[in-house]
């Protein structure tokens, strides 16, 4: 990202100049709300979680149900307009909003129905994980969601879905049982292992390439209070803590999900931290966690029993909306001393205190799902690495972008070719080959053929885009 690009993202936006005579007709049969530039609610409606993104759609279609989604898809398709889909709008690339096109906004679609006897739940596409968990936890149930409660269930699940319960129960997409999907032709299809099975395979990891998920049905699991929280050490202890983390996670049971972070404490001091969730009997968790909790002299030992909903919102204050975010990510083949030293060097010299890095431990139930069972392709990777260039001031944004890029490049000797699609930035920055790398050649070819079957004109292209086969 050049200085010109950073500046343009934060300059006063220009309203789209298109005038659509079909808007009054659409409005007459639309149950939700249609917002155009100048309408009350338009300005907050075009804002997304990443403050780096500043785009002005011609029309925001705030849908009230699947019928509204069908109409909005048809409206955009018939006029050749760019089409973005907004659920939780947490995607760092800003794919939930577009310039001069139509935004299908699902944020008002919040219905959730839990079936405790079958241990399933169906939730509409505008639900966030915090809302989802509040309902399922009323019955002592949960499934793998994100690590920030304000993330939408749809985007996270369709891209794979790393979360606190992943090593216990697999990714969010592994727990998807069915979805109601509006495809590019305007049809509402119920997609599952027995209905449109090819499309169901592609939904689980293929991102938003195949349509708008108006509702999703998940498998639930008994989840009571978990043992979780944060262990925070001074940055001086980071090398030894990361080495311990490497050795500890190599033999950790699947009940434990454990992330390492080099960041800044709420008090403003550089820190090394471990965030964790033990999803099992507390007495077993205390024994498993003993090596971590007995290490050094932590600034904070916040580990203890907590509701799962508390764990899910624990990191929310670190990821508020409106900050300027630029991310780079890769799966790591290991966590050797050279990789740790590289992390320390870059995190000791950050352009802003908000810049940081995270390591997510994979494996467990994630790696036990068959390689060909879903579009998600990185099941054998031990760790996912993420460096985040973050600032509050647009004048600092370019330095944060440069830092994240250099950091990521320096980590490539320790990385696999793969990447988690939910952490990819805009294609103009990442390049189309990075999307291919997320799936590998064989899966990408299969996804491309699926795209050609269900979206041959690539209407759903504002995503980590899979090109239709020709």
Image (cartoon, rainbow, N blue to C red):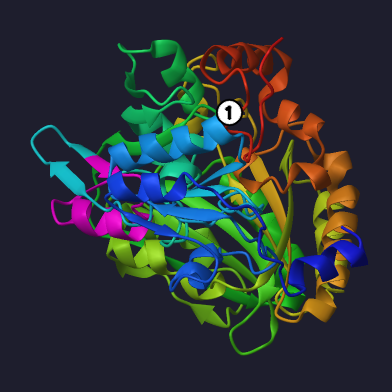
Picture quadrant of residue 3: bottom right
> Residue lying farthest bottom?
267
Position of the N terminus by quadrant: bottom right
From the top left corner, tell me how far across and down residue 456 is, in percent. Answer: 60, 17
Identify whether 253 is placed above or below 457.
below
SS of the residue at dot 1?
loop
Please state the horizontal and vertical placement of residue 340, each as a whole percent of the image: 80, 55
The answer to whether 87 appears left or right of 260 in the picture is: left
Q: Locate the C terminus and report the quarter of the image it occupies.
A: top right
Residue 86 showing in the rendered view: no
**Residue 15 image offset from top left, x and y in percent:** 66, 64
Relative horizontal placement of residue 101, taking residue 404 as reference (left or right) = left
Q: Furthest-left residue in view?
A: 117
Q: Nearer the viewer, residue 284 or 106?
A: 106
Q: Which stretch is magenta?
A: 122-142
Residue ID at (37%, 60%): 286
Across and down, in percent, residue 321 comes to: 55, 71
């Amino acid at each position: 990202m050049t200085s010109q690009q950073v500046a343009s993202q934060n300059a006063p936006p220009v309203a789209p100049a298109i005038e659509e005579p079909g808007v009054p007709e659409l409005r007459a049969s639309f149950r939700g709300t249609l917002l155009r530039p100048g309408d009350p609610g338009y300005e907050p409606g075009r804002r997304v979680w990443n403050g780096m993104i500043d785009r002005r759609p011609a029309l925001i279609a705030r849908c009230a149900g699947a019928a509204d989604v069908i109409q909005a898809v048809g409206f955009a398709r018939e006029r050749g307009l760019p089409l973005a889909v907004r659920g939780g709008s947490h995607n760092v690339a800003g794919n939930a909003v577009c310039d001069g096109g139509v935004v299908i906004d699902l944020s008002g679609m919040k219905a959730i129905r839990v079936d405790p006897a079958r241990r399933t739940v169906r939730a509409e596409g505008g639900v966030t994980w915090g809302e989802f968990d509040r309902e399922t936890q009323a019955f002592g149930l949960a499934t793998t969601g994100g690590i920030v409660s304000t993330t939408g269930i749809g985007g996270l699940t369709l891209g794979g879905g790393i979360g606190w319960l992943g090593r216990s129960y697999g990714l969010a997409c592994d727990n998807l049982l069915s979805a109601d999907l509006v495809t590019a032709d305007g049809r509402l299809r119920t997609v599952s292992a027995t209905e449109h099975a090819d499309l169901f395979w592609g939904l689980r990891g293929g991102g938003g390439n195949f349509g708008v998920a108006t509702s999703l049905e998940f498998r639930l699991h008994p989840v009571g209070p978990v043992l979780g929280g944060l262990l925070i050490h001074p940055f001086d202890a980071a090398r030894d803590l990361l080495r311990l983390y490497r050795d500890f996670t190599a033999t950790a049971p699947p009940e434990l999900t454990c992330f390492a972070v080099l960041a800044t404490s709420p008090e403003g001091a550089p820190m090394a931290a471990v965030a964790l969730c033990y999803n099992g009997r507390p007495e077993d968790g205390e024994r498993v966690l003993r090596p971590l909790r007995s290490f050094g002299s932590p600034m904070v030992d916040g580990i203890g029993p907590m509701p799962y909903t508390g764990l899910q919102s624990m990191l929310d204050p670190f990821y508020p909306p409106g900050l300027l975010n630029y991310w780079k990510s890769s799966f790591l083949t290991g966590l050797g001393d050279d990789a740790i030293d590289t992390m320390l060097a870059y995190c000791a010299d950050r352009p802003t205190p908000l810049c940081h890095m995270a390591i997510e431990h994979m494996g467990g139930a994630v790696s036990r799902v068959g390689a060909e069972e879903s579009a998600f392709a990185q099941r054998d990777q031990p760790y996912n690495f993420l460096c985040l260039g973050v600032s509050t001031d647009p004048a600092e944004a370019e330095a944060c972008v440069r830092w994240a890029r250099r950091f990521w490049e320096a980590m490539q000797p320790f990385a696999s070719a793969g990447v988690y699609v939910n952490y990819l930035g805009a294609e103009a920055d990442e390049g189309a080959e990075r999307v291919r790398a997320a799936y590998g050649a064989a899966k990408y070819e299969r996804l491309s053929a699926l795209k050609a079957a269900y979206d041959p004109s690539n209407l759903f292209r504002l995503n980590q885009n899979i090109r239709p086969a020709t």
